[in-house]
Image: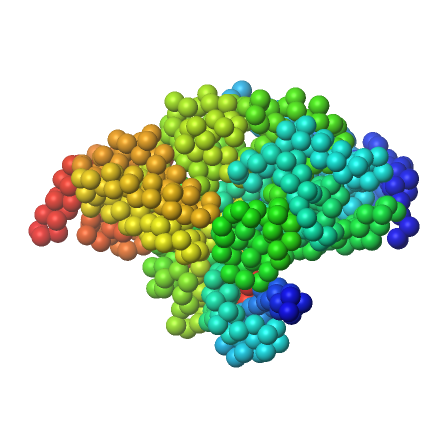
Amino acid sequence: MEDNVNEFNKNQKELIHILHKIQIQFGYIPAQTIAQISRQLKVSESEIFGVLTFYKAFTLKPRGEHLITICMGTACHVRGAPVILDEFRRKLGIESGETTADNLFTLETVNCVGACALGPIVIADGEYHGQMKTRGVSGVIDNLKQRKGTAQKNG
Amino acid sequence: MGEFNSSQLDRLKEEILGSREDQKTCITICGGTGCHAYGCLKVAQGFKEEIRRQKLLDKVDVRTTGCHGFCERGPIVVIQPEGIFYQRIKLEDIQEVISETIEKKKIINRLLYVDPRTGRRIVCEKDVPFYKMQKRIIFGNNGLIDPSDIQDYIAVDGYKALSRILFDMTAEEVIAEIKDSGLRGRGGAGFPTGEKWEICRAAKGDVKYVICNADEGDPGAYMDRSLLEGNPHSVIEGMIIGAYAIGASEGFIYVRLEYPLAVKNVTIAIEQARKLGLLGKSILGSEFGFDIHIFRGAGAFVSGEETSLMASIEGRRAFPRQRPPFPAQEGLWGKPTNINNVETWANVPLIINRGADWYSQIGTRGSKGTKIFSLVGKINNTGLVEVPMGMTLREIIYGIGGGVKDNKKFKAVQTGGPSGGCIPADKLDLPIDFETLIQAGSMMGSGGMIVMDEETCMVDVARYFLNFTQEESCGKCVPCRIGTRQLVEILTRITEGNGEEDDIAKLEALARTVKSGSLCGLGQTAPNPVLTTIRYFHDEYEAHIKKKSCPALSCKDLIVYYIEPKKCVGCLLCLKNCPVGAISGERKKVHVIDQDLCIKCGACLDVCPPKVMAVSKYTGKKKEQIIKQSVKRARR
């Protein structure tokens, strides 16, 4: 009996690795993959759903073509990150965590990227923009519009 | 390479050193996160290409190293062996550096760091005040080695401690040495490391695990990231030594999702260590075997708590659980497990190499060794600083950090992340160690040190942290899940000018409930930012609640932006930059902000030329007057 339980536990240990892989490959966790993982690992679908919604790395919805991440770490906060976030929300017309209707932009926040010297920081498709000012916001957006999306790679 | 043994390690080191000319010029480029963001990779590439082009390959080495710590001045380039320190290097500077400094040994003045206090240019890295006052025993090698090359680590005595303990020390002796050193956990709580190991060693069971907690979640703290990125082998060596002392055969490094470069460098380091037989079966020919796996976190702050972290490795939601049983007794998959933080592990080889006596002379009575802090926020010299325990806040902030940015007035320093608190100016002479910080109502945490000036609103800071913990609360304990939410709601209404008379008392009562009714460190410490700001900045709370004013001029709902008619020169700059068209005016005529339209983004203040400085912020009564004026004007 104990062996079985151990075997079961050992199976579940692969769950987060697998979710990472799917998230990177598709840019989100497609619903149909949950049943597949469940059969493979012998872990219930509800448990998988519980795990994937617990962690911020996993999303059930696809992201837009471009990903804009605003660092909301303490150092960025005291240097005005909330104002920068407001400006992106206003310019894109979406809240943090949402994607624009044309599927071009996803806006997200992160708790700290550890590049505090450059605060406030915005990461646009993996590229760091330090010491952001409100008037620099439209430049970042326009810049992204001009190139092909690489947002999925950041997953 | 299974036959690689300890004498071969010595020989390899000799070989490495022999193949390297002592006096050969080496251009080291900081490859830390900050410098990365400034584009150091392009600079490194540029140097390599230029060296090749000028056929200097046999005379000059180029090396991308770990983080040097002085992020404010990135990209940083240090030329060895002289230690010439060039800062804010751009692609355009490369040619000149090579033709002048490398070939003609001439210093380029404009690339040197200027001490803002004396105005003097400083040539060598070690003489820069930022570094001079530090004691970089853990962090010092970062700037010398290429983290992706194990040979660099071996060249600076890497894995010597491991070789020593495997053949000359029993597990008990290793534990005794760590206990004697006085090393305490660097993750925040400060539990004595040797004692922790001893408990885990004594625990019953054949299978034991060691874990490196690299889920550095405190916003504003990034020393663990820099260590893992810059000197991953020091952490790995520490873990192998710990595993030997405890009797563990498997280890995990749990790395935060947001740190891809750390994952990459640690992966490379583990592979190289395996190849040399420093990980795997019979390490260095001994009977001891141990291996390490990397586990990528998935973005949950609570996974930094040890029982949550283990749940996460097991593939479950990162819920903390009741202790006891402690992980040392029942940890990962129910087996005895020892968890230490990145910086703690990195201390271990050093203690073995230089001895507990040497180590325990550094620091204070209860807190030994050094601590790495990330000095960030409104400070001139942002970066990572390593100082002996017991240094005062003033020495760190003014001595190393060069004081508050833009000559503003210092208000507080926040330590300990969301679990810590804000320490006011009258406590600047506090010598920092585990105990003194707790007495001040804060804590060491993982070492974040966020400097705040007169423009930082302390109520808003409390709201910021509570908003953070509220979002990150896993939801298991009701007082934490609902209590933090209530705290945020009260704090938010205070910052919006809707604070009520008894709100401070409500906050305090609620804070006590959350503290006492939560299972893990997240909930138990979440109210600290509220409690310390109430304790030290009571008047700011009062001003928000009673006068509906924000003395720091920071809370959006309590301030207005106003163009001083006497100062405005009518240059149209603010008018053009206002994102909502709230400013009206003509060239050479005074501009006016329509307070109804203004979204308080501060763009007008940013762009108003320093000579003019016509845009001011007001709060309280004056704010009301300005709004009334604006309404009147709109009616006209």
Please identify the quarter of the rendering in which residue B72 is found: top right
Q: Residue at x 48, y 72 (%)?
A: A46
Q: Is residue B462 visible?
A: no
State the image quarter where residue B133 is shown.
Answer: top right
Count of marks placed on residues: 0
Q: Is residue B502 left or right of residue B24?
A: left
Q: Residue at x 43, y 33 (%)?
A: B442
- Place of residue B629 in the rendered image (x, y in percent of width and height, measured from the top left): 12, 43
Tell me which residue sits at (28%, 32%) in the image.
B538
User: In which image quadrant can residue B352 be found?
Assistant: top right
Q: Is residue B277 above or below residue B400?
A: below
Residue that appears at 19% across and 52% down = B596
The image position of residue B67, as x and y in percent, is 64, 41
Q: Is residue B596 above or below residue A125?
A: above
Q: Residue B455: give x, y in percent of width and height.
A: 34, 35
* Render colour scheme: rainbow
Q: Is residue B355 left or right of residue B415?
A: right
Q: Is B397 in front, or is B277? A: B277
B427 or A143, which lies in front?
A: B427
Residue B366 located left or right of residue A105: right
Residue in front for this viewpoint, A31 or B318: B318
Q: Residue B316: give x, y in percent of width and height.
A: 54, 62
Instruction: Report whether residue A96 is seen.
Output: yes
